Image: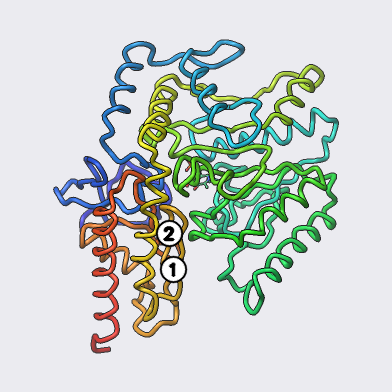
Amino acid sequence: MTPHHPTLLEPHTSPSLHTAPHVIVRGEGVRVWDSEGRSYLDGTSGMLCTNLGYSQPRLVQAAARQMAKLPFFASYAHRTNDVTLALADDLARLSPIPMGRTFFANSGSEATDSAIKLAWYYHGCLGRRRRTKILSQERGYHGTTVAAGSATGLDHVHKGFGLPLPSFLKVACPDPNGPQAEGLTEEQFVERLVSGLEQLIEAEGASTIAAFIAEPILGAGGVVIPPPSYYPRVQEVLARHDILFVVDEVVTAFGRTGAMFATTEFGLSPDLITLAKGLSSAYAPISAVMVGRRVADTIAKGSATIGAFGHGFTYSGHPLASAVAREALAVLVDEDLPGHVRDTAPLLLKGLERLRGDAVSDVRGYGFLAAVTFAPDAVGRPADGWAPAVMARAADNGLLVRASGDSIVFAPPLVSTAAEIQLMLDLFEKSYRSVLMETRFAPR
Ligand code: PLP
């Protein structure tokens, strides 16, 4: 057995593992290479984030120019840098909601924590100090810092840390394929979800709830696409109770769904939007919270009474990351990548649909975000489960995809051509069918 690497504590990995990690050393276009020289098509854009592929020259040059001009200057106590101001202006122009301001951080988790603190601060400005509880969904993913991890609805993020904190409460996952939806029409399912939310608000008291945070499509929870009428109904309930609506667009923003923002695609009107990943195509760590006008105006007024917004990071509005993000946004617009995703997504979904049957119980997708789910009880189930076995076989065949529960998630870089998507589909089908053949027909 190859020894594990003794100096790195690996994120989202068991420290008890004694095998060496898989090491990627180079990327170009939609391909990466590992330390053994093997090449892979990247079917999940790194962590659903390298949306422009790996060697976008405009991003590389933007980083080099900014590094030479001003590698760092903090945004702190009313001093900032020009490129961060310009990025805030860019986002205000693109914003899908009436904009107030944008707050910058470094990761999706920090964006979630910042949105939660903004919600607390907003209610504080209005004298509602009891409004501290945060609602979110089972299987929603918002990060792993203490507040974001508490808002996340996945056990593996809670286990071992005593999370969630007590003021973080969950509503049911809006999964049309989940057990809660069984035997119900779409309308009845939405009714059940909405009345569950109303009951929770009534039981806790609206005057104790600050915000509800949710992803338009739940990514890490296994690509859950809620019924179209779900969020409009949720929004109506939240507005009635003056609970802020935070839309987590860390995965969905910047073209992933075929629109610049899923907020527009699904007709949502959030108070706050969190962004990360595709904002810089992951070439530099940066995240943001778009603060809608109502919240921005309230905190501008209220801070005169309750004091300055005492939140921020050394690297909030880092000029290098801001310069890269500005260029990434320009590339998205210049190349109309949302349009390319809209045009090419049917190929991805149709190709996956061909696999339905045998061990594949469901296929779903929206834009360049799709998933295949395996029936856990399908004949021939590999010992570790279908998804890990197919994911490992796909890697052997030169395709990187991610397993999430019983599903395999696809999120190809937005720049993937139709031919590259077809190649990913072919490699995936070959991998799945070879696992199927082996497990079904191997002597037991
Ligand atoms: N929100 C969503 C929807 C995510 O998918 C993620 C990460 O995958 C996060 C937040 C957290 O982002 P980060 O890992 O940058 O902290």
Q: Is residue 27 visible?
A: no
- Which percent across, then down, holds residue 393? 26, 66
Q: Quadrant of the N terminus?
A: bottom left
Q: Residue at x 38, y 51 (%)?
A: 343
Residue type for callout 1: Val
Q: Residue at x 43, y 39 (%)?
A: 278
Closer to the N terminus: mark 2 or mark 1?
1
Residue at image mark 1? 363
- Which percent across, then down, holds residue 342? 42, 50
Image quadrant where residue 71 sits? top left
Q: Is residue 307 above or below residue 38?
A: above
Residue at image mark 2? 370
Taking 170 as reference, is 69 left or right? left
In-front residue for pair 237/162: 237
Q: Is residue 299 above or below residue 55?
A: above
- Which residue reaches farthest bottom? 443
* Element type at mark 2: strand
What is the tally of numbered marks visible in this picture? Answer: 2
- Tag shown at residue 64: none
In-front residue for pair 157/410: 410
Badge 2: how crowded within 10 Å, few (<14), some, or many (20+)?
Answer: many
Cβ of mark 1 under 8 A from ligand 1: no
Image quadrant where residue 309 sits? top right
Image quadrant where residue 93 sits? top right
Residue type for callout 2: Ala
Q: Is residue 426 visible?
A: yes
Q: Residue at x 41, y 33 (%)?
A: 333
* Pointer 2 with pointer 1, Cβ within 8 A: yes
Taking 205 as reference, is 18 left or right? left
- Which percent across, then down, holds residue 371? 43, 62
